[in-house]
Image (cartoon, rainbow, N blue to C red):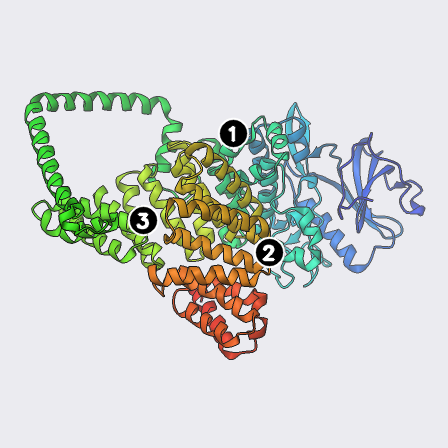
């Protein structure tokens, strides 16, 4: 039995099997139509291959109500389909020839017999390239738009309802089965069926979120736009946005919830997540997986995801709007689904007018070259003299300052004590104001450098002080959008973020990024680094979707500008894997994390700081997958490297100590975990201070230990300190699910702390 409730025109005569006649009284014919064989049937209708004998001879498809199904509601639905199709007159919609009723009163209609195959099967069978698929899909959009202009919504668009036939050696799509159509403005018949509240109409994999909402009555044309978006996704990727197997396994309510709430991967991401199937999909489109992902990234990602928006107000308003954007993409014009940046529009213009732009650019370059040559020839001696004098003076001042800076290492100055790099740095930071006061530009450069060193050592207050002074000097002398001023502002944002002031860090990073995009361009390595920093701040604030989008953009730029194995590129990939974990995209996160770690070890060696960061992120992913033994092993390895590279009191080392303790807790090893966490907390309070987020997380984990060991008051005290002094708002979800807190849930103090964190989490997400 065909699973499709409105099966029609889906089996050519050679593949159909004769399953019996229609109503017994019809004796193998209905009016002038001789029934040849049943093509299929669904919940309410039968579809027959038939031969019309008068007034003309032709093969048709005849659809009628199944025996025993001719209730008032079903008949009304059937008449709705019959009348809806009668209104259609478009090359991409199957035509209706006739309609009537059998002697037993069973309604039927006669329509064009379409012997094609589903659009997805056709495209794969003939291995159509992406452009050819889009051109065919645009014709489908035009047909659906025609139906909408006739005030009809299909509401069950899917590949099996869009058959492709060859007409004059040209592929033509034919839309069939308007059995679920809904009249928007026009009364089709007196018995038109209105879909009742609580009745699901449509096919789950292609169903719009509003169709999956059993309380929603107002289904409009954007429902078909969503289904078209699903079909477009399948044509591009070879898979559905939401896994049909997962939908089935979720049960009825779970399936509806997934359709309403689960956001699919972008097509370019999905194709790489298919594993072995990605190569088959790519070959069906005459591509390699990597090249297909590149082709989908950008315009086609944006267009498809706009059509698949859960909020229909953010979708395309009509199929024609969707088709228009695809046509713009094929013509290399800017698409509406893309944020229209000036750089993006310029790239599109260049691609459309390569020859003209090339000629114009050549002429401009020749003119500029001539002007530059004349200028250089006019003042070469003066410029070289000024440059040499400036460099000599700068070198002298730096030498004098560095000489004084290292005088502390002299035995007479040190009084026999050992001297650390920290002491040298502290002495230099105190004397930089007087030592370089006559050259504020150089003074600011040295302050910026030392501020960055302090931050790398985890000494955030000293870092913040120096960077604020450097920013004031550079902003006043060089201007607020000078690259050096922006560099200092970004360093200050990093220091603030590392010290837990994420809201202030976001403000600075956004200001820097906006200016760098204008001044340096969106593909400049410095712009890319700021994008990475801002994405990290957004991740820390719990705004994971924003962070993922920015990391993706930065990673694309880094791979093309610096190469896939550059440490900066690998750092961004590692950060992206952490954000994917926070979004519960564990398989994708683990795959990216392991690939990145392998590349890093090969490119920069096992002891590079970027390797430590990736090991931390990969262990985080494994822990979220409940692979606690693997997470603990990865964390121990990273801790060993961090102690060797950073030292025992560096923030990265302390983070790993806390993470290892947390892994031991999850494995039920509370004494071992508690010992590890207490050691970390003692160092954090001394080095980072009591209000740092890392200190708060360690207190939180120690509260879990205390709760399990029956120390109720100690657990609540540690939790209160953590909530009041730096615990991230996003930890509200963790506090609610930790099994160790079961004994605390009835205590009003615990309930109040959870409520406080929830409120702060909603504020960070921008929710009321």
In the rendered structure, the answer to whether residue 482 lies left or right of residue 43 reads: left
Quadrant of the image for the C terminus?
bottom left
Give the residue at x 84% y 51%. 106
- The 10 Å Cα crowd at callout 1, few under 14, some 14 to 19, many 20 or more, is few
Q: Which residue is mark 2?
A: 260
Q: Earlier in the sequence, mark 3 or mark 1?
A: 1
Give the residue at x 41% y 58%. 541
In the rendered structure, the answer to whether residue 661 lies left or right of residue 47 reads: left
Residue 291 tag number: 1
Q: Earlier in the sequence, mark 1 or mark 2?
A: 2
Q: Is residue 676 visible?
A: yes
Q: Closest to the observer: 417 or 711?
A: 417
Mark 1 element type: helix
Q: Which residue is mark 3?
A: 456
Mark 3 element type: helix
Q: CA distance from mark 3 to mark 2?
A: 45 Å
Give the residue at x 15% y 45%. 410
Residue 351 locus on image (x, y percent): 39, 28
Give the residue at x 89% y 37%. 18
Q: Is residue 337 visible?
A: no
Q: Earlier in the sequence, mark 3 or mark 2?
A: 2
């Amino acid at each position: 039995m065909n699973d499709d409730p409105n099966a029609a025109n889906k089996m050519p005569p050679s593949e159909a099997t004769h399953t019996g006649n229609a109503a017994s009284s019809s004796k193998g014919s209905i009016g002038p139509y001789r029934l040849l064989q049943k093509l299929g049937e669904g919940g309410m209708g039968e579809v027959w291959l038939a031969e019309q004998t008068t007034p003309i001879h032709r093969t048709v498809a005849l659809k009628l109500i199944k025996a025993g199904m001719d209730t008032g509601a079903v008949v009304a639905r059937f008449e709705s389909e019959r009348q809806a199709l009668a209104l259609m007159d478009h090359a991409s919609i199957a035509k209706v020839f006739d309609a009537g009723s059998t002697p037993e009163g069973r309604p039927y209609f006669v329509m064009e017999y379409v012997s094609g195959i589903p659009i997805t099967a056709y495209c794969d069978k003939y291995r159509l390239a992406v452009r050819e698929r889009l051109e065919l899909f645009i014709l489908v959009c035009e047909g659906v738009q025609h139906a909408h202009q006739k005030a009809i919504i299909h509401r069950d668009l899917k590949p099996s309802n869009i058959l492709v036939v060859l007409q004059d050696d040209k592929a033509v799509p034919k839309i069939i089965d308007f059995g679920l159509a809904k009249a928007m403005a026009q009364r089709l018949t007196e018995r038109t069926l209105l879909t009742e509240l609580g009745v699901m109409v449509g096919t789950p994999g292609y169903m719009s979120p509003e169709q999956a909402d059993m309380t929603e009555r107002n289904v409009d044309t954007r429902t078909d736009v969503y289904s078209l978006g699903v079909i477009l996704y399948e044509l591009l990727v070879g898979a559905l946005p939401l896994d049909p197997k997962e939908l089935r396994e979720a049960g009825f309510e779970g399936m509806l919830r997934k359709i309403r709430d689960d956001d699919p991967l972008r097509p370019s991401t999905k194709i790489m997540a298919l594993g072995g199937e990605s190569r088959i999909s790519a070959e069906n489109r005459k591509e390699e997986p990597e090249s297909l992902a590149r082709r989908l990234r950008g315009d086609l990602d944006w267009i498809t995801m706009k059509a698949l928006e859960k909020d229909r107000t953010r979708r395309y308003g009509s199929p024609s709007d969707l088709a228009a954007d695809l046509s713009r993409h094929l013509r290399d014009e800017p698409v509406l689904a893309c944020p229209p940046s000036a750089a993006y529009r310029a790239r599109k213009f260049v691609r459309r007018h390569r020859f003209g732009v090339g000629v114009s650019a050549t002429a401009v370059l020749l003119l500029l070259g001539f002007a530059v040559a004349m200028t250089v020839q006019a003042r070469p001696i003066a410029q070289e003299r000024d440059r040499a004098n400036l460099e000599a003076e700068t070198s002298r001042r730096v030498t004098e300052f560095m000489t004084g800076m290292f005088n502390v290492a002299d035995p007479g100055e040190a009084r026999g004590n050992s001297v650390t790099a920290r002491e040298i740095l502290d002495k230099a930071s105190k004397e930089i104001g007087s030592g370089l006061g006559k050259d504020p530009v150089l003074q600011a450069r040295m302050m910026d450098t030392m501020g960055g060193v302090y931050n790398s050592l985890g000494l955030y207050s000293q870092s913040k002080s120096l960077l604020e002074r450097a920013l004031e000097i550079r902003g006043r002398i060089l201007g607020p959008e000078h690259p050096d001023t922006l560099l200092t502002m970004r360093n200050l944002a990093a220091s603030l973020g590392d010290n837990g002031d994420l809201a202030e860090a976001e403000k600075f990073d956004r200001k820097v990024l906006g200016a760098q995009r204008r001044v340096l361009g969106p593909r400049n390595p410095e712009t890319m680094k700021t994008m990475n920093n801002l994405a990290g701040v957004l991740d820390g604030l719990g705004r994971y979707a924003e962070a993922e989008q920015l990391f993706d953009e930065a990673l694309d730029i880094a791979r093309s500008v610096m190469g896939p194995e550059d440490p900066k590129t690998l750092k961004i990939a590692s950060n992206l894997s952490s954000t994917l974990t926070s979004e519960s995209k564990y398989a994708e996160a683990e795959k990216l994390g392991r690939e990145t770690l392998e590349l890093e070890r090969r490119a920069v060696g096992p002891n590079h700081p970027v390797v430590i960061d990736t090991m931390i992120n990969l262990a985080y992913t494994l822990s979220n997958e409940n692979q606690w033994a693997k997470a603990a092993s990865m964390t121990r390895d990273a801790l060993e490297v961090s102690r060797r590279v950073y030292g025992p009191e560096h923030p990265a080392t302390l983070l790993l100590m806390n993470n290892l303790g947390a892994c031991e807790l999850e494995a039920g090893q509370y004494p071992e975990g508690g010992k590890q966490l207490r050691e970390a907390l003692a160092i954090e309070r001394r080095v980072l201070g009591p209000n740092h987020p890392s200190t708060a997380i360690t207190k939180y984990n120690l509260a879990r230990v205390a709760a399990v060991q029956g120390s109720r008051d100690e657990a609540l005290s540690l939790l209160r300190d953590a909530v009041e002094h730096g615990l991230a708002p996003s930890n509200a979800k963790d506090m609610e699910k930790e099994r160790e807190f079961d004994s605390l849930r009835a205590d009003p103090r615990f309930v109040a702390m959870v409520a406080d964190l929830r409120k702060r989490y909603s504020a960070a997400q921008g929710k009321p």
